[in-house]
């Protein structure tokens, strides 16, 4: 594979953090250094990952870290031969941010988290370890019950917060991507996500992050049955017709893309509950033909500024994460996605 072949292939660092913790019954987080080692250890026919996508919160990163501390992290990552791509802003209650649907104080905390992420992005950009990628957000309003009390007003409030956050991002030369994930109010279905993106109305600065595991549950209408495009027992023909319908609505907004697998279940761990279940790349119960489905999202990807794609497999057990074969299987399917749908720079 020549060095000018895009998209670059990234692994996510947050599987070592999301759903982990130090409470009873939780598995402990896996350090950034260990996640980097496991990513660097993956190899298929001499080919390796090009980089990582990075979560801007403890224990991997102190979002209040000094520039010098951040440069040391950049040096650590670059030392493995990796670029940094997209960054995850700590927008949730309990991190830096708070609900984008909340009161004025909560929404200001949300925007401050985006401002903090943009600052860190700037340090990484100046260092040279980061040359592409976006900053990932969501509404940070967990569950859809409160949103459902007044969907129109609440979507408008989230959109207003997102617009303010997008202005901050634009001032820093960054783009924001809202991840469609069924647990976050306002973008818990394909239709509500589209409504929110259109309400924000800043496609040059705020777009969509498509994750294959989460968008599969969009099809099934898990948190919005009225927007289901498939019913259980569907045929292959019905699946791909529905998939194309969904992707054609969201693809024009898609500026960041996660390759993933889903077995049709909803799953959670720790404080992160009721979301799409990520499965191993080679899971026999996986519902998706990863390579074929990725092609729907990656059509015209270069025109949307996409230069890399990232594997997302959060909430795997530590035993699975610590197994090198897990990462080899992931890299293998990522290489197949690029071989089928890549382009030259």
Image: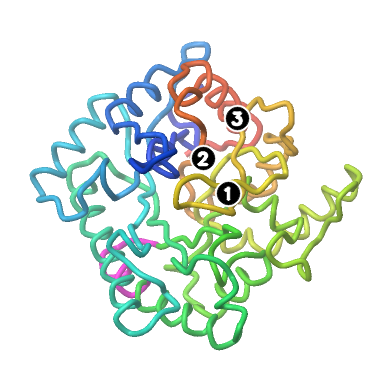
Residue 54, position in %: x, y?
Answer: 35, 43
Give the secondary structure at mark 3. loop
Residue count near mark 2 (Cα–Cα under 10 Å), binned few <14, some 14–19, many ≥20: many
- 57 left or right of 18 in image: left
- Which mark is nearer the camera, 1 or 3? 3
Numbered badge on residue 59: none
Is 170 within the magenta?
A: yes
**Callout 1 touching callout 2 (CB < 8 Å):** yes
Image label count = 3
Q: CA distance from mark 2 to mark 3?
A: 10 Å
* Residue at image point 59% right, 54% down: 274
Q: Residue at x 38, y 56 (%)?
A: 135
Above or below, 94 against 13 in this view is below
Which residue was labeled with disc 2?
312
Q: Identify residue for label 3.
A: 280
* Mark drawn on residue 211: 1
Q: Earlier in the sequence, mark 1 or mark 2?
A: 1
312 lies above or below 47 = below
Magenta portion: prevailing SS class: helix
Q: Residues within 10 Å of mark 1 (few under 14, many from 20)?
A: many
* Front position in the image: 329 or 145: 145
Residues at badges 2 and 3 in contact (C-beta under 8 Å)? no
Horizontal relation, residue 180 to residue 127: left or right: right
Locate residue 17 relative to residue 338 in the image: left or right.
Answer: left
Could you tell which of marks 1 and 3 lies nearer the N-terminus?
Answer: 1
Q: Residue 99 in the image: x percent, y percent?
A: 40, 72
Residue 122 percent across, percent down from the top left: 21, 54
Q: CA distance from mark 1 to mark 3?
A: 14 Å
Query: Where residue 326 appears, x then y in whole percent?
Result: 53, 22
Q: Is residue 312 magenta?
A: no
Part of the protein shown in magenta: 166-175
């Amino acid at each position: 594979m020549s060095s000018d072949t895009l998209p670059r292939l990234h692994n996510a660092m947050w599987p070592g953090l999301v759903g982990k913790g130090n409470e009873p019954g939780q598995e402990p987080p896996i350090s950034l250094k260990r996640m980097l080692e496991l990513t660097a250890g993956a190899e298929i026919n001499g080919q390796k990952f090009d980089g990582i996508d990075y979560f801007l919160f403890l224990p991997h990163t102190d979002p209040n870290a000094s520039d010098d501390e951040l440069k040391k992290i950049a040096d650590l990552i670059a030392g493995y031969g990796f670029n940094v791509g997209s960054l995850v802003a700590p927008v949730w209650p309990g991190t830096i941010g708070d609900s984008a649907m909340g009161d004025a104080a909560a929404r200001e905390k949300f925007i401050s988290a985006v401002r903090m992420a943009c600052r860190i992005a700037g340090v990484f950009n100046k260092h040279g370890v980061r040359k592409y990628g976006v900053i990932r957000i969501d509404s940070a309003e967990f569950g859809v019950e409160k949103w459902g009390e007044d969907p129109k007003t609440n979507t408008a409030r989230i959109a207003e917060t997102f617009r303010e956050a997008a202005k901050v991002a634009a001032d820093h030369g960054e783009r924001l991507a809202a991840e469609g994930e069924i647990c976050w109010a306002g973008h818990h279905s394909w239709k509500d996500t589209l409504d929110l993106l259109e309400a924000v109305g800043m496609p040059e600065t705020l777009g969509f992050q498509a994750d294959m595991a989460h968008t599969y549950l969009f099809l099934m209408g898990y948190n919005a049955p009225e927007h289901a495009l498939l019913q259980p027992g569907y045929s292959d023909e019905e699946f791909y017709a529905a998939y194309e319908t969904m992707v054609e609505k969201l693809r024009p907004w898609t500026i960041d893309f996660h390759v993933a697998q889903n077995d049709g279940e909803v799953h959670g761990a720790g404080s992160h509950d009721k979301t799409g279940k990520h499965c191993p790349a080679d899971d026999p119960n996986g519902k998706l033909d990863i390579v074929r489905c990725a092609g729907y999202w990656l059509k015209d990807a270069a025109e949307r500024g996409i230069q890399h794609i990232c594997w997302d497999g959060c909430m795997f057990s530590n035993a699975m994460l610590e197994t090198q074969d897990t990462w080899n299987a992931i890299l293998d399917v990522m290489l197949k996605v690029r071989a089928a749908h890549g382009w030259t720079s």
